[in-house]
Amino acid sequence: AGYGRQGGNIVMNAAVYRSFSGPIAIESIPLPTAPPDGVVIQVMATGVCRSDWHGWKGHDGDIKEHGLPFVPGHEVSGIVVEVGEIERVKKFKVGDRVAVPFILSCGECCMCVRHERPTVCERQEQPGFTKMGSFAEFLALPRADRNLSMMPEGVSFVEAAALGCRFTTAYRAVVQQGGLDSKKIVAVFGCGGLGLSCVMIATAYGANQIIAIDVSDQTLEKAKEVGANNTINARKENVQQRVMELTNGIGADLTIDAAGFKATCEDAIHSARRGGRMVQVGLPLGEQNPIVPMGMVAGKELELVGSHGCAAEDMPAILSLVQSGRLDPKKLIEREVTLKEGAQALMDMDRGSPVGMVMITQFSNVPRSRY
């Protein structure tokens, strides 16, 4: 990597913003050191995610609490280049290829220990939110033994980074919180990166029928490419009516709001069948709260379930889906870019998100190993 010295300190390239919505510039910042229970990785690939845009715009409380300047990025894979204390990091060594979930749970709080729910860990760390992120040549990661996973042979750094947020979050929403099986009809509301990942996970797990809903014909074409049987353009059709028509008047067994808008949430609730389940995985923003018809929820015995991230312990199972060919994240990779281009792509989300993923894979003009 292109690290060097600046005033006696070892520095690296990173994309940094010093004000919310301000310029994201490539700067030289100090090289991180390994936490006692963690590692430093050389970042080999990192995704440009809508969540990073929300953080840059000032929508995320964790980043506000951390303070500026800040480095975004949370979808990441890389190579271990430094290890903390040998008594506390026993699973990893220098040179290991690792995949990183964006939730780094503590393993000690009530949620982790008593309830075994690391996705709602009370003291979770998140690169790109609670700590400096992966738009950099190197990244320090705490709690390595508990949270990182070895990358199996045949899985690329780009594929592993793509799993870090969107695909793992989709896996928990569809399979774990959604309880998907091959008999079920699934409707996915909002087909950005997360929604398309939900479609692909549902396809990998053999859903009976997959209905994709979005406002973009281009996005809906992509949804068909990756497994959707039917599509609905919410700008042109009555969504709830069309879902009922496509399900013989019954509704979907599982509906997923992958966008977090008022309309997508309401449509997902109303489109679920009697006794069906609606999963909220897209994060709502803004002042427009959805109207939740609790009388209908009670009368139809609907299940409304939240979903957040994915437990680190489930990463190996998702990596094996990629290794076996059942899941192909490359279908969603739109382009690979430099660190500077990735920073620009994040700022360009002011005008909308790309259909596919943008993946940063070049971090320096002079690529070379740290050692």
Image: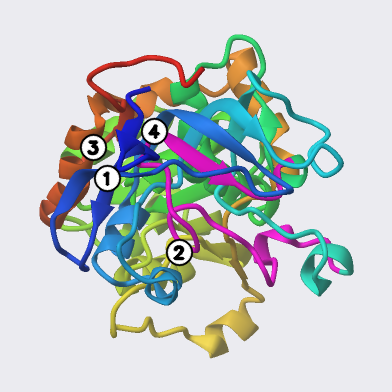
> What kind of element bears circle 4?
loop
Query: Tag 1 or tag 4, which sits nearer the N-term?
Result: 1
- Of residues 149 and 95, the one nearer the viewer is 95
Q: What stretch is highlighted in magenta?
A: 115-144
Say which of marks 2 and 1 sits in front: 1
| In the foreground, 97 or 231 | 97
Horizontally, residue 142 falls left or right of residue 78, namely right
Q: Residue furthest bottom?
A: 295
Tell me residue 215's x, y (percent): 20, 52
- Which label lies toward us, 3 or 4? 4
From the top left corner, tell me how far across and down residue 30 is, in percent: 39, 45
Pointers 2 and 3 in contact (CB under 8 A)?
A: no
Disc 2 element? loop
Of callouts 4 and 2, which one flags the residue occurring earlier in the amino acid sequence? 4
Residue topped by disc 3: 342
Callout count? 4
Q: Mark 4 points at which residue?
A: 137
Residue 271: numbered disc? 2
The answer to whether one can see residue 133 in this image is: yes
Q: Distance between the residues labelled 4 and 1?
A: 10 Å
CA–CA distance in space, label 2 to label 3: 37 Å
Circle 3: element type: helix
**Is residue 333 rendered to the left or right of residue 91?**
left
Q: Distance between the residues labelled 4 and 2?
A: 45 Å
Seen as rendered, the residue at the extreme top is 154
Q: Mark 1 points at which residue?
A: 15
Residue contact at pointers 3 and 1, CB within 8 angstroms: yes
The residue under label 2 is which amino acid type? Answer: Ser
Q: Which residue is rendered at x = 30% and y = 62% of the image?
A: 69
- Going by the numbered disc 4, the residue's amino acid type is Glu
- Asked if 44 appears above or below 176 in the picture, the reply is above
